[in-house]
Image (tube, helix red, strand yellow):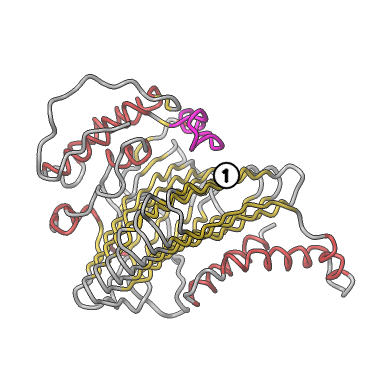
Amino acid sequence: MATTTTSHGTSPGPSRAPEAAPRGFDPATARPFLEQFDRLKADLPGGSLSWVRDLRDQGRARFAQLGFPTVKNESWRYTNLRALDKLAFQPAVAAETGVRFDVLPTVRAAGTSGPRLVFVDGRFRAELSSTAGLPAGVELLNLADALTHKPDLVGEHLGRLATPDDLPLVALNTAFLADGPVLHVPQGVEVAEPVELVFVSVGSDEHPTSFHPRTLIVAEDNARVVIVEHHVGLGTGATLSNGVGEVFVGANASVHHYKVQREHTNAFHLSHTAAKVGGHGVYDNFILTTGAKLSRNEVRSTFDGEHGDIHVSGAYMVRGDQHVDTSTFIDHAVPCCTSREVYKGVIDDTARAVFQGKILVRPGAQKTDGYQQNRALLLSETAEIDAKPELEIYADDVKCSHGATAGELDDQQLFYLRARGIDKEAARGLLIGAFLAEALDEIPEEGVREAFQAYVSAWQNAR
C-alpha cells in the first residue's frame, strides 16, 4: 500500500483518517508499543531535529495502521508472531551494569584488538568500545551521539532504504529509532581491520524486554570495509531485538558484512537489512544462526549501477523447538549484474526452518546472472523446513537458476565412516560439518570463516 514519504527537513502534510489495515496484519497488536512510544518520545535522542521527529511519526503512524503481520500475510505465512503479543514486552531501560563482560565475542586472534562498538540491550556502552585502528576520515560512532552532535552525517541516508511502507517491523523500529552503530567510510579508503559490532541481549528477570537497534553503513565510491556483527545473549529473561540496517555501497566499493546470531533460547530476534549497490560495487552478506527461540533475518538488496555483485548467503543450525526464518529479496533493477545465494541449514528435534528467496529481474535488466540455492539437512523425523524459492523475470537475455532440497544424512556415507572405526556420533558430526562447509566457503575472509567454523563446532558439541 502506498504511503506519503516526507523528505528530511520538511513537515508532513495534513493528517488523514487512518487507513484500514490490509489483509494479513493485526492493528490491535500495535497498541502496547504505541503507548510505550508516546511515553518515551520526548526522551529519544535527536528530538530537536524536525526530520527525525517526522521519521519517527511516520513509523508510528504506519505501525498503528498495520500492527504485527499474521500468517495470512504471504511473506509471513510460515512464521507466526503471535507469541510476541502474549509476552507484554517493556522497553529496555538503562543498560544492565551488574553483568560482567569479561570476554566479548570476536573474530580476532587472541591478544589483538581493533575497532569495535558494543551495545547492551540496544544501548551504547562506550567503556567496552574502541575506534582504534581506523584510518583517518573513517567515522565509527553510535547513532544517539550522531543525531546529537553530527546530524549531517546520518541525515542524508537514514530512513532512505528501510522505509515503513508495508513492513511493520521496520515501522516499529523507525518509531523507536534511538541508537545503534553508524559507520562511514569515505571515498577511496580501505579499512584493513574488521569492524566488529557487538549486540548483547541481557533483558530482565522481571519482565520481557524489547529494543530496536538501528544500523547505518555508508561506504563511498572505491571504499572497502569488512563488518562483523555478533548477537549474543546473557541472562534468561525473554528479549525482543527488532533491528534494522541500511547499507549503502558506492561505485567500485566493497562491503563484506557478516553476522552471527547466538542469542539465548528465550530470545526473539527479528532483523531487516536493506542494501543498495552502485556500479561495479560488491555487497557480500553472510548470516550464521544458531540461537534464539524465534528468529527471522530478512535481507533486501538492490542494484543501483551496472556490473554490481551481490552475495547473500548463510548457514543455520537449530534444535529443540527453535524457529528460524531466512527471507531474501534481490532486485536486479539494472543490466549486467550478478547475484549469488547459498544457504545451508541443519534442523533437529522439533525445530522448524523457513527459507524464502526471491530474485526479481526488471524489464531491461539484460545480462543478469542470478543463482540461488537452499539445502536443508533434517536430523529427526519431526524436524521441518518450508522452502519458497522464486524467480520473477521480465528480461529475455538472462541466466538465472534456483533450487531447494531437503534430506537426511546419507546412510551409505555414515556406514562408510563407521566401518573405519569412527563411532556414530563422531561420524554424524563429520557429515554435518562437511554439509555446512559449502556455505561457510562463501566467506572469503579467512579469519571470519575460521571463527564461524568454530561456532558451528560449538553448536555440534553442545548436544
Q: Residue furthest right?
A: 419
Look at the image and give the residue range highlighted in magenta.
Answer: 69-86
Which residue is labeled 1 in the image? Answer: 388
For image coordinates 26% across by 62% down, the residue present is 218
User: Residue at left 38%, top 48%?
Assistant: 243
Q: How many marks?
A: 1
Front-most of residues 364 and 89? 364
Work out which quarter of the rendered image holds the C terminus and state it: bottom right
Taking the spot 54% from the left edge, 67% from the top edge, the residue there is 452
Residue 205 location (% of width, % of height): 47, 41
The answer to whether 12 appears left or right of 372 in the picture is left
Q: Secondary structure at mark 1?
A: strand
Q: The N terminus lies in which quarter of the figure?
A: top left
Q: Position of residue 371 (x, y in %)?
A: 53, 60
Nearest the viewer among 342 and 322 is 342
389 w.r.t. 275: above or below: above
The image quarter containing residue 283 is bottom left
Q: Is residue 19 left or right of residue 314?
A: left
Q: Is residue 400 visible?
A: yes
- Image coordinates of residue 415 in percent, x first then y, are 87, 65
The picture quadrant where one finds residue 113 is: bottom left
Query: Could you say where residue 225 lies in the image, as x and y percent from the top left?
Result: 34, 71
Question: 360 left or right of 352?
Answer: left
Classed neighbour count for the residue bearing mark 1: other residues with Cα under 10 Å, few (<14), some (14–19), many (≥20) = some
* Image position of 335 with respect to 236: above or below: below
Q: In the rendered image of this protein, does residue 233 appear above or below residue 126?
A: above
Judge whether residue 102 is colored magenta.
no
Amino acid found under the numbered disc labelled 1: Lys
Which residue is at a point 42% across and 27% down the rendered structure image?
Answer: 25
